[in-house]
Image (cartoon, helix red, strand yellow):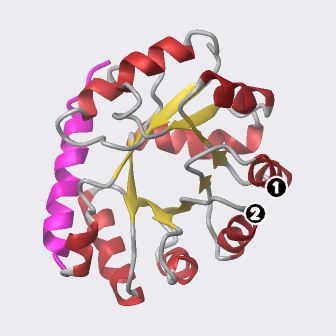
Amino acid sequence: MINYMNDILTKFESIKVVPVVVIDNIEDVVPLANALINGGLPIAEVTFRTSVASDAIKLMVDSFPEMCVGAGTIINLNQCKKAIESGAQFIVSPGYSEEVVQYCIEQEVPVFPGICTPTELMHVANSGLPVAKFFPASQCGGVETINAIGAAFPRIKFMPTGGVNENNLMEYLACPRVIAVGGSWMVKSNLIREGKFDEIEAMTKGAVALVKNHKR
């Protein structure tokens, strides 16, 4: 295992749910972060799908030191560098990029590349990474696929993302190969845009309650 990843992996394994957020307006960063913290999930994967993503990460990191803030949907090296410069504490990609992975390893920044095939998982294993993002999880067979392709890679765990919600969360967490899940059901883009942060906080609390009731 890459030692510098130990802290983030421990946090993921403890929290179990990583909110995947899309931020269109920088004004939404503070109330969103407060909703997540008050809801019991002081963590966020801010996706690089909008023009304010890097600024949102910096603001969240600077304003909420108790939060663990990462960057998601990183698809090239330029985005990766910008995210890390903004203070991202971990990097998540929808697929496997050799240059992104190697840069993160050089910078000692935890990285979670996306996979959905054994070939992609071989790249992850050969890079020495302990965890892969399984994406899109539901569309690619969910837990059954994780168990099937994971059998050849006994040392790698998975963070399924894509189609994960309150209805199937427990199924994923019951899988010993799953370290945590990525999900957006409690931080849907329309809820953020409409300023429904009380609803986000309530749904976050609901996710936390499900995790607490989970017995593996």
Q: Nearer the viewer, residue 185 or 49?
A: 49
Out of 98 and 59, give the one closest to the viewer.
98
The residue furthest bottom is 27
**Which residue range is magenta in the image?**
195-216
Q: Are marks 1 and 2 in contact (CB under 8 Å)?
A: yes
Question: Which secondary structure, mark 2?
Answer: helix
Q: Could you tell me if residue 42 is visible in this image?
A: no
Residue 103 numbered tag: 1
Q: Which amino acid does label 2 sit on?
A: Leu
Indicate which disc residue 77 carries.
2
- For residue 60, above or below residue 88: below
Q: Which of marks 1 and 2 is nearer the N terminus?
A: 2
User: Residue 206, image x and y in percent?
Assistant: 16, 49
Q: What residue type is labelled 1?
A: Tyr
Main SS class of the magenta portion in the image: helix
Point 20% across, 31% down: residue: 213
Which residue appears at 82% of the width and 55% of the height? 103
Is label 1 or label 2 in front?
Answer: 2
